[in-house]
Amino acid sequence: MNDQAQSLRRLVSKLEASRERQAFRTHSARVLTVSSGKGGVGKSNFTLNFALALKTLGRKVLIFDADIGMANIDVLMGVRARYNLYHLLKGERNLEEIIELGLNGLPFIAGGSGMADLFTLSESDLNYFTSQIEKISEKMDYIIFDTGAGLSKETVKFITAADECIVVTTPEPTSITDAYALIKVVHGMEQEIPFRLVVNRVASQQEARQVTDKLSLVAKRFLDMEIPMLGHIHDDPHVMQAVKKQIPFSTAFPSCAAARDIQRLAMKFLEVPQVGQKDTLTGIKGFIHRWLKHTK
Ligand SMILES: Nc1ncnc2c1ncn2[C@@H]1O[C@H](COP(=O)(O)OP(=O)(O)O)[C@@H](O)[C@H]1O
Ligand SMILES: [Mg+2]
């Protein structure tokens, strides 16, 4: 644990000294989606604990709960969102007002009933929404959308609009094939979206490697694309215990296997240079641009 704290501190000071920090001041937030083919693979738990880890590493992160059917980021933190997207889209609240503060002051936007309306907005409402999002993104380093599982047109729209998609899978064959199906469909619509894989609920690092190799091989052969592994998270009973307590596992059990994995993964995420969509805008401007493109 000591070793880990030390390397964490080293990384923070390294990053703070770097030019990356400067760049963030002038750029809008990088937009990530966390998605999966199959449901229940651990997207929301990953999103929440990953965001908390990035926050500990000095990043400003906003979570956007974009799972239309089963939004539950607030439940996982044991907080109740007063407002959600609905209040923004109905003009009752502005974006700042619907951002709730969760654990450790982690900002998030609850999805809820407004989510479905987001796809049928009039042009003036859409303009209002995008101008609000643009404003907030100047203050953030990352905006992370926790999307629904599978290939609904809403989820695909979020993924194709973002800078990068983090695909969560477990070692179960059905989860892997569904992850591949998702990647294939999205790639067919926007070839430049970079994907990275998080293999959740593994028994060992070796198992995570095998899952990644399996998926990468097929993606290389049939889609001519790379799917690097961002990291793995062990199958850990503390996760379920934390869900029951409504406290994120990395907070409830900071030294459990899953919490250590998340911390390692977040550090790696910041160390690896981030690829964006080529030839296109990045950040929220790119997001809105591509969102509108797929609306037409
Ligand atoms: N690393 C893990 N180890 C053990 N159980 C896990 C792990 N990740 C997720 N789970 C279990 O899976 C359930 C679903 O996770 P959740 O994050 O809600 O999935 P999703 O958002 O993909 O539907 C959790 O409530 C927990 O019981
Ligand atoms: Mg979820």
Image: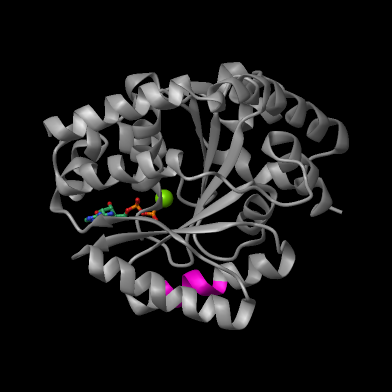
Query: Which SS type dominates the magenta stretch?
Result: helix
Q: Quadrant of the C terminus?
A: bottom right
74 horizontally vs 219: left or right: left
Q: Answer with the quarter of the image where residue 140 lies.
A: top right
Residue at 76% x, 25% y: name it: 131
207 horizontally vs 265: left or right: left
Number of numbered markers: 0
Q: Quadrant of the N terminus?
A: top left
Residue at 28% x, 30% y: name it: 8
Give coordinates of residue 65: x percent, y percent.
50, 40
Which of these two is toward me, 172 or 260? Answer: 260
Which of these two is toward me, 258 or 157? Answer: 258
Residue at 77% x, 48% y: name it: 290
Q: Is residue 93 above or below residue 29?
A: above
Which color scheme did the rendering employ for the protein?
A: one colour
Give coordinates of residue 241: x percent, y percent.
15, 45
Q: Which range of residues does the magenta coloring cover?
A: 176-181
Which of these two is toward me, 223 or 69? Answer: 223
Q: Is residue 175 above or below residue 240?
A: below
